[in-house]
Image: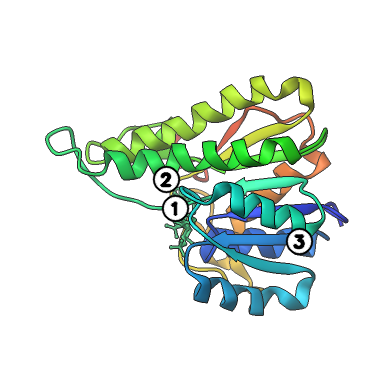
């Protein structure tokens, strides 16, 4: 129970990675608030997670309601120890037609900035913030991912800047950078048979377990890091 009595908010969590992160955090003893815009999806997740401990949903848009989401989470959890922002959204574009620039910068830079801004005053020494970048933001560029790549590079840079800014307060900030997350999450399944090292993608469990580890004190000397998670594919 590495997160016993810890209070966790997961923003952008109505399926896949967010679902799995909530599950593993709860299995580790945390009380969890999950956020996304779609209340119906959140309610379904809360129903399937409620057997594992305390969990509730807060419907809202991280781009417009970040303060409300954080305040409600802190009120209902009795405080806040860890915040994970994994607002999604994937669009392809090019320099000829950068149609996704605003959306991708909003989802992958603005949302984590706004949530971190709303949460940081409530976090304490030993708290953490965890973000989700992408291999495409830190490693090999793709020609059709102009705005997404810049956005995810911004996520990784935000980790570096905030880790420096929050160092003296003992609040750590890290990220994972997946290549590809495959499918949705199902509690209790044998996910390990679904992937092997060198595969292009892996199920949400593989990524969620690293996010939860980053919250625990096992990772208390890990700060300002964006961990590539592609099973080593980028070197092959
Ligand atoms: N899937 C991949 O292969 C892959 C690869 C690399 C990195 N990533 C990153 O990993 C994270 C999770 O990926 P995913 O595929 O599970 O993402 P996703 O399904 O596209 O989005 C995750 C969640 O974000 C919520 N969301 C979107 N906009 C929001 C907003 N403004 N406010 C609050 N919630 C919002 C969505 O729920 P609602 O629509 O209900 O709001 C959804 O549940 C994302 O950051 C993604 O960019 C994914």
Tell me the element at label 3: helix
Question: Alpha-carbon distance for marks 2 and 3?
Answer: 26 Å
Give the labeled residue for mark 2.
107
Please indicate whether residue 40 sits to the left or right of residue 116 in the image: left
Q: Nearer the viewer, mark 1 or mark 2?
A: 2
For numbered disc 1, what is the local secondary structure? loop
Q: Residue at x 77, y 39 (%)?
A: 127
Q: Do tag 1 and tag 2 residues touch (Cβ < 8 Å)?
A: yes
Q: Is residue 43 above or below residue 224?
A: below
Asked if the beta carbon under badge 2 is closer than 8 A to the nearest atom of ligand 1, the reply is yes
Q: Residues within 10 Å of mark 2 (few under 14, many from 20)?
A: many
Placement of the C terminus among the 4 image quadrants:
top left
Query: Residue 48, image x and y in percent?
Result: 65, 78
Q: Quadrant of residue 35?
A: bottom right
Image coordinates of residue 150 in percent, x first then y, are: 35, 32
Decide: few, some or many residues near mark 3? Use Cα within 10 Å; few <14, some 14-19, many ≥20.
Answer: some
Give the number of callouts: 3
Above or below, 95 relative to 184? above
Residue 208 falls left or right of residue 181: right
**Marker disc for residue 88:** 1
**Mark pair 1, 2: CA separation:** 7 Å
Disc 1 CB within 8 Å of nearest ligand 1 atom: yes
Front residue of this view, candidates 232 and 67: 67
Query: Which of the two residues, 130 or 187, is positioned nearer the viewer here?
Result: 130
Mark closer to the chain start, 1 or 2? 1
Q: Which residue is mark 3?
A: 76
Q: Which circle marks residue 199 in the picture?
A: none
Is residue 225 among the parts visible in the rendering? Answer: yes
Which colour assignment does the render follow? rainbow
Q: On the picture, is 193 further left or further right than 87?
A: right
Secondary structure, mark 2, is helix
């Amino acid at each position: 129970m590495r997160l016993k009595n810890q209070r966790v908010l997961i923003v952008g969590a109505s399926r896949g990675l967010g679902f799995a992160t909530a599950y593993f955090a709860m299995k580790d003893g945390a009380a969890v608030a999950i956020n996304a815009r779609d209340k119906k999806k959140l309610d379904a997740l809360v129903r399937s997670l409620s057997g594992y401990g305390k969990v509730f949903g807060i419907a809202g848009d991280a781009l417009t309601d970040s303060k409300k989401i954080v305040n409600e989470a802190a009120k209902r959890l009795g405080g806040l120890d860890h915040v994970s922002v994994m607002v999604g959204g994937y669009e392809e574009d090019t320099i000829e037609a950068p149609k996704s620039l605003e959306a991708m910068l909003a989802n992958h830079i603005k949302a984590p900035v706004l949530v971190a801004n709303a949460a940081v005053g409530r976090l304490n020494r030993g708290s953490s913030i965890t973000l989700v970048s992408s291999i495409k933001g830190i490693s090999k560029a793709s020609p059709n991912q102009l705005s997404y790549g810049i956005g995810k590079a911004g996520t990784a840079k935000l980790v570096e800047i905030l880790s420096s800014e929050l160092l003296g307060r003992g609040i750590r900030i890290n990220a994972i950078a997946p290549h590809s997350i495959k499918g949705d999450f199902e509690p209790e399944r044998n996910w390990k048979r679904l992937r092997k090292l060198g595969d292009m993608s892996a199920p949400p469990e593989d990524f969620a377990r690293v996010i939860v580890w980053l919250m625990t004190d096992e990772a208390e000397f890990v700060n300002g890091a964006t961990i590539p998670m592609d099973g080593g594919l980028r070197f092959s």
